[in-house]
Amino acid sequence: MAPSSRHRKHDVFLSFSGKDTRNNFTSYLYRALKRKGIGAYMDENQLKTGQNLSSSLLRAIKESRISVIIFSKNYASSSWCLQELLKIMELKRLNKLEVVPIFYHVNPSDVRKCTGSFEEAFANHQQNWAHKLQGWKDAFSEAGYIKGWHIVGDKSDRSEPEYMMKIVEDIMKKLDLMSPNDIKGLVGIDHHKQQIKELLCINVKDIPMIGIGIWGMGGIGKTTLAQAVFDEVCGEFDSCCFLANVTEESERRDGITSLRDKLLSVILEEETLGTGTPRTGSKLLNDRLHRKRVLLVLDDVSDLDQLEILVGGLRHLGFGSRVIITSRDQQVLKNGSVDKIYKVEGLNYLNSLNLFSLYAFKKSHPLDDFVDLSNRFLEYAKGVPIALKVLGSTLYKKTEEQWESALDKLKEHPNPKIHNLLKMSFDGLDDLERGIFLDIACFFKGAKAEVAAKILNSCYKGAHFGISNLFDKCLINITEDSTLWMHDLLQEMGWNIVRQESKDPGERSRLWIPKDVARVLKHDAGTKSIEGIFLDMHGIDGIQLHQDVFHKMHNLRYIKFYYSQLSGKEGNSLLSQQDLKSLPGELSYFHWEYCPLKSLPPNFTPEKLVELRLPDSNFDQLWDKEQNVVNLRVIDLRNCKNLTRIPDLSRALNIEELDVSGCINLTDLPLMIHLKFLENLCLKDCPVTKFPEIPRTLKTLNLSGTRIEEVPSSIQCLNRLASLHMSCTRIHNLPDSVVKMDSLKIICLSHCPNIIHFPNVSENIEDLNLAYTQIEEVPLSIGCLSKLSLLDMSGTRIGNLPSTISNLDSLKAIHLCHCLNITKFPNVSKTVKILLLDNTPIEEIPLSITLLRGLSWLSMSDCTRIKSLPSSIFQLKFLQYLCLQGCSNLEIFPEILETMQCLSQLAFFRRLIIEASPILNEHITRVYHTRNLNVLSVILSSGFLKFHTLSTLDLSGSNIVKIPMSIQQLPNLVSLYLKCCKSLIFLPELPPSLQNLNAHDCTSLELVLSGRQFWENSSLVHMLFSNCFNLDQDVVDNIVANAQLRSQCIVEEWVKERSLGFYEIITENIFDRVVACSEISERFEYQCRDSSITIKLCPDWKTDRFLCFVPSVVVNFKNNPKDLGVKIVCEIQLKTICHDCHNFISRWTLPLYYDEPIFFDSNNMIIWFDKNMFRKDEHYEEALFEFYITAGEDGKCADHVKVEKCGVHVFYVDAKCSINGNVKSKKNSSSDEEEGKQALKHLESSYGISAYLPCTQDDENGCSPNMIRFQSNSPIDPDWLSLKNSFNSLDFGGSTDREDTNFNNGHDKPTLRRCKFQL
């Protein structure tokens, strides 16, 4: 098999004699291959000239996966054919081409022996091709021995079309084995991948985020599956992010925050975007996320907190976003924000055999003599991919006897858990490799390979070689970013080996389980067996350490006491009234956060110490006398507030990193000039007054927050320094010698109040941060900084930038925020992508802004002197973000005439007055304004045709009278806000994509001219017509009818999904409707002029069904204070015929307009439907509903607001409606026929629909559109009857306790997917 065959241009190269087969067999074979979609190459040159093969033919052979050689009578007569054959066989020997010979009307024996007609042909070549003849004969003979197809051509043989079909099938099988699906680790993945893609609905872009959980045991292939789906569909999204190993990364300090920041940086395409908190951050950040269609994979999630932090804020992701979460814990997925859970099962027999063979034999099938043995190993592995892979690798090129021995060994050590299989590989390691493997499994998985190797090398001579061997034996992996990694099953196997060393943790070699470590430390139970201790101190009560706690641990090499990021520090977990008396001399890695010690033991010899990390500790000093720390590479003493000095480092010749940032009492620094390997020095916030003497090898120097007042000219000797940070210091400027530092790329001098002149820097500088200094002028010489990428002059006194800045072709970002002397828009290089000019007195944006063709981010918030924008601004094709917040004097917003491919956010709120608005172009996804809008004269007309990607349209508070009919042509409009549009009289037909319609307080609104948005568009989630007191009664009736029809649709679809095996999470609130109305609609068959109602139900022992309710209440909000939010609570009690009572609660909360509450006036009718409104019918005979209002955060009953009237619509859904639903109304349910008649009468009276019922009960057509016809006077367009996309807009993530899930019958929680119900 050609190893790189999947990169070839052609699938098949046909080598043939044109004289014999061009116009018959070969031509037909070529067409047959083409019909199957196989890329075949057939040379069309019938008159071949010259003696040598053309370059195109040679290239075609090299770029093919398979070569089909059609040996015919005159094949050997052609020198071209023989040259082709020679090249083909040459590539075959190199395993770069697979060969399929076809012996067409010739004897294969003649081909092998070069006899018959071929003998004469070769003889004829003797004169002209003597020098190549033997090579041709050898290739000819060699090809004859390859297994192929023999077409005899006589009457006893099968027909050529039959041969053709078989040959094509054979070639397809061979190509299939060469396809990417055959790559190691991806065997048998296609079915799973297709299932996941269908669940993700990749091609549906106008729906909210869909989350899919991939669930299965460790090593079953969850990550591989997620990666395969990610790779295949990532091109469909705006941004893609694959966060691997979430659990492991989260447990590191700052891990979960780092993951969150990495996630945001990738999605929003910024190199560093740190929120510093577990939440996503500002509303602006969330709004930016809302405009991104994102594909996100969270791999190996093990805790709900991880999902809350990583995914919770990502509910702001834009429409069409998809999230895939892999986990071994199904409960984590149930409690998380996934819509469906997909379980990954083990490989079937054929795929198991294929994967195993790839590693055991380096081919897709076992050798004949090993078939039975292979089957026995497959039985042992039980379809787990990692077990098949590792077992196959250990058996590669082993004899049958060795295979038998391996099986015998497995029998002697039976283990029901799959990870125990992997101990076979461990047994094959030598002592050094075993030690390294266990250290990586217990301590260093996820560490940088180079860092871990240095630590391990201090304990194991030849550690680098040992790591290399472990990699070769598939026991560890080194990722692209040089991180040590291993599969979970392999790690668990390593853990198990350590556990089996002794039942007493104190007698084991490695401790990492908190309870085991706590036991050993608390009871001073350590022994010489212990080689390493890692302890996450979260949850560890204060353990008082004995002075001799480490005295008996002579072989202890690693200590790490830390707080994981998710837990944070809670008190002092490890206490010590006195300093320790001793530490083991074998210690190579010592990491203790919040260490209570004041100093290290005086007799401690840190000769083997490689890393010393003691951040946030209580140390006054480390040690008194000089120590031999020749192996020490890292000292991390961050935030050791009591540390007054660093010990003598005269013998720390190999130290690479020293971090004492935040050591506020550290005044004395040791001599460091001799530290030839020191690269990173951080003295941030230390009370250092003098620039330190440091070695020339330094690459990063951070002196921010120190008391240094002068940088010496000798700094130029630091010829490797790349980054210099001196923000918040007292320095007056950098010395002129800095200009000679060619290696210096980053200088940060922000918030240095004594800097008044622009510094002289090297032409190689890339990032220059001078923000909030006293600099008043940027010199013309800045034009010489040819590599400058970022210039930050925010908050300085500078005036307008010099003209030479336009010469900086490398400049990508300029920050000039709060520069109060800048009055002109800067004339900058065409390469600038980010321009921040917030709160500057700039008065005008020039027409020449169009020259900034690469500009993607322009922020001019609070530029109050800007009155208009030039129309040329919208010629910026790559502009993504335009912020005009707080530009209170902006009067004219120009018409956008150009197609702006990238603009996704246009922000202009806070006191914006627009007198003329544009016909906005099709690439803007949101237009909004939310603060004190005074005048908005919207001139939209047919301009909506350009809004193809507009998702949110907010016209709230405007004086708009009507919305043009063309709004229905906005295919991606999701939210329409018309709050307080008091002049609005009617709504036209709205687009089917709409999910949120807010027409609150549209006091003049009377008509909704088309019912389509209510009946055809079942994706509407929130529909607010509160305080619309002039709304026509027909519109109110349509809203109520929509709610009832949609609830039926939703339940039926869920039942169908459930019957197909999809158990999903249901959101808390499915939809709601609010209408200004003082009466309960007649469509609610059960009503009461009070706040409670009792309904008699009809139990049915014969039918498996679901009982469903749609509640409605009329509430008088007249006395509701504006500062008090309310909730409507519905307590439901269902009684069975056995007098059992099942209680549950449903709540409806007043909606928000962005972050602002919406307050209702007078009477409004509220209809809602949520997950508690339908449950499995357990033969209920009575239902009691009690409604009341709660107010405030304490949830107390509100006396000032009350439910005046209530109503309930009841219906049943057959639990077996997996093909076509059967929705039954409760009222008059004595028989199916009578029930159907009543339902049709209801339709007829409500909508003018004339319909008929099928004649038999077992007719499964359900609610087919063919059963309905319309009266001529029906006000309803027949086209609206298709209800679709009902549930895609919902934000999933609710959980349900036992009393809320009695309809689940113990199954997984379901989630509604999409509603395709048709009335």
Image (cartoon, rainbow, N blue to C red):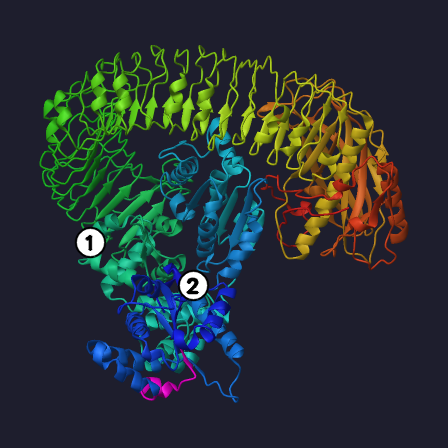
Residue 506 showing in the rendered view: no
Magenta stretch: includes residue 78: no
- Mark 2 secondary-structure assignment: loop
The x and y percentages for residue 614 are 26, 38
| Count of residue discs | 2
Q: Residue at x 37, y 25 (%)?
A: 852
Front tag of 2 and 1: 2
Query: Which residue does the numbered mark 1 point to in the structure image?
Result: 457
Residue 654 is drawn in which quadrant? Answer: top left
* Residue 301 x/y as whole percent: 46, 48
Quadrant showing the N terminus:
bottom left
Write the residue at 53% across / 88% down.
155
Residue at mark 2 to residue at mark 1: CA–CA distance: 42 Å
Q: Nearer the viewer, residue 545 or 994?
A: 994
Residue 110 colored magenta?
A: yes
The residue closer to the viewer here, 621 or 648, is: 648
* Kind of residue sitting beneath label 2: Ser
How far from the left and from the top, in percent, is residue 260?
42, 38
Camera-side residue of 576 and 845: 845
Which of the labelled discs sits on residue 747, or is there none? none
Taking the image as shown, residue 189 lies to the left or right of residue 604, namely right
Specify the segment rendered in magenta. Answer: 101-116
Dot 2: within a 10 Å radius of its alpha carbon, few (fewer than 14), some, or many (20 or more) residues? Answer: some
Q: Earlier in the sequence, mark 2 or mark 1?
A: 2
The answer to whether 477 is drawn above or below residue 92 in the figure is above
The residue labelled by disc 2 is: 179
Judged from the image, the secondary structure of the residue bearing numbered disc 1 is helix
Would you say 340 lies left or right of 988 here?
left
Q: Residues within 10 Å of mark 1 (few under 14, many from 20)?
A: some
Residue 773 against residue 552 in the figure, above or below: above
In the picture, measured across the screen, residue 1123 lies left or right of residue 1166, that is: left
Name the residue type under label 1: Asn
